[in-house]
Image: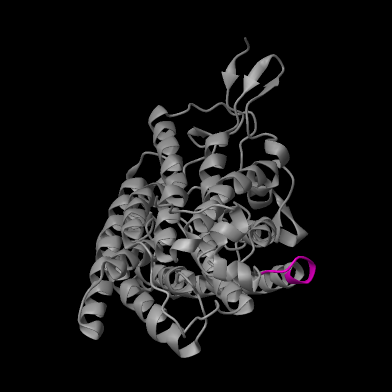
Amino acid sequence: MGQIFADEAVPPHALGSGAEAPAQEAAAVEFDSADIAWMMVASALVLMMTAPGLALFYGGLVRKKNILGVMMQCMFLMGLMSVIWALWGYSLAFGSDILGGFVGGFDYLLLKDVIPYWKDGAVVIPANGSIPKSLFMVFQMMFFIITPALICGAFAERMKFSSMVVFSVLWGTFVYCPIAHWVWSDTGWLCEWNENALYPAFDFAGGTVVHISSGFSALVCAILLGKRLGYGQEPMPPHNLTYTFIGASMLWVGWFGFNAGSAVGSNPAAVNAFVATHLAAAAGVLAWAVAEWVFNGKPSILGACSGAVAGLVCITPACGTVTPLSGIILGLLAGFACYFACTSLKSKFKYDDTLDAFGVHGVGGTVGAILTGVFATKSITGNAEGSGLLEGNTQQLINQFVSVGAAIAISVVGTIIILKLIDLTMGLRVSKDGEIQGLDLSQHGEEGYIFL
């Protein structure tokens, strides 16, 4: 057997980012076993966030006639988005620029130059820093899976399963991949380590790419699909908050892989992200629970779970650039902001965002992305330019606003176009009878609870 070597060496980035730096052709690198082990664990943790984490968190919040519909959406997206990512999604996100840098090209189509291959009598293992590129690809795949699954919370209990499938394919291809290319590709115009970037923005683990994109797309979905039958006229309480608690706990644990894994190695950047992530989630729990205590008289388990997720969402873009103590501040602000978005804002504008995908992910992601430009510090980033407003870097705050605006724009416009096309060709909503019956039976022919 020929020599096993890596054909690309990627210098470590000061911020410990997960994006690929320009390759050094035919330069052998030595893989790091600790980095490989951690990234495999992190990838598994992020996958767990979709199912059973998100499936249980969302599933407990719907009515019992729709529990399997939510779980099927999460399970099916784990399969569907994985295959799309391997075939063309990864290439569109991380390939070389096409269309003026709007999206990546076809460099890695069908995992070309990603998985090991045979060349000149030797096995070539493409590398991303100290890990195989195939491992970096699969870690990013898990983000591609969970992002459209988050959107499902906005149209839960009323969207046709077939329409959800087509929407996820188109949205992932034409909305997610371009944003990921802008922010995380080494040539992206928002990429923080691209010296030619127009507005280099900090997004360590996906506040812009994952949460703002899914949150604002979710709001569009909620508005265009319309309200559930009987919304605002009849009670629609969560059917099993025990599921929601278990799901939220799994999301909290999985988020360590989501955020600390974005350091792409077992290193100090991963440690800082890990600690900041936990403290932000803890602060989010306190903020939401206190808000409920003050305004409703009682703190609820649903509020505590929602606050934890809000804190996790908010710290996601910032965990590689802020201190853990700043993470507490971000978690507190996110808990309060998302609480009011999910109560007062939703009540005022009367949109039916079933599971508050916009209120938590859209609002929390936006707050986090902007505050990253305030609290970023060179003591964490390791360079003078890696700072925010509090250290005198006003430009970074501007960059954060630009990145937020760009992500919102493509998410809103892209989602409107995709939904309109689907509505014209195959329809978006289940029938009235199907919605009354529940998606478990009308879409899947199954029941979640059968008591004999």
- Which corner quadrant holds the N terminus? top right
Task: List the single residue furthest toward the top.
Answer: 1
The foreground one among 30 and 150 is: 150
For this orientation, the residue located farthest to the right is: 425
User: Measuring 59% from the left and 29% from the top, which residue is drawn there?
Assistant: 27
Q: Is residue 126 left or right of residue 120?
A: left
Way the structure is coloured = one colour
Residue 316 relative to residue 419: left or right: left
Residue 212 lies left or right of residue 451; in this view the side is right
Q: Quarter of the image holding residue 286?
A: bottom left
Q: Is residue 314 left or right of residue 349?
A: left
Count of numbered tags: 0
Q: Looking at the picture, how far across and down is residue 295, in whole percent?
A: 25, 85
Q: Nearer the viewer, residue 214 or 365?
A: 214
Tell me if residue 48 comes above or below residue 54 in the rendering: above
Report whether residue 316 is seen: no
* Residue 197: in magenta span: no
- For the view shown, which residue lies furthest in the bottom direction? 348
The answer to whether residue 427 is magenta is yes
The extreme front residue here reads: 452
Residue 154 shows in the view: yes
Residue 289, image quadrant? bottom left
Residue at x 47% of width, y 28% of height: 31
Location of residue 418 with respect to 50 vertically, above or below: below
Give the x, y percent position of residue 208: 51, 64
Q: Position of residue 228 (x, y in %)?
A: 55, 76
Instruction: Please state the extent of the stretch shown in magenta in the rendering.
Output: 423-428
Residue 30: x and y in percent read: 48, 26
- Of residue 274 and residue 119, the one placed in the foreground of this image is 274
The quarter of the picture where residue 240 lies is bottom left
Residue 180 lies, with reference to residue 37, above or below; the image says below
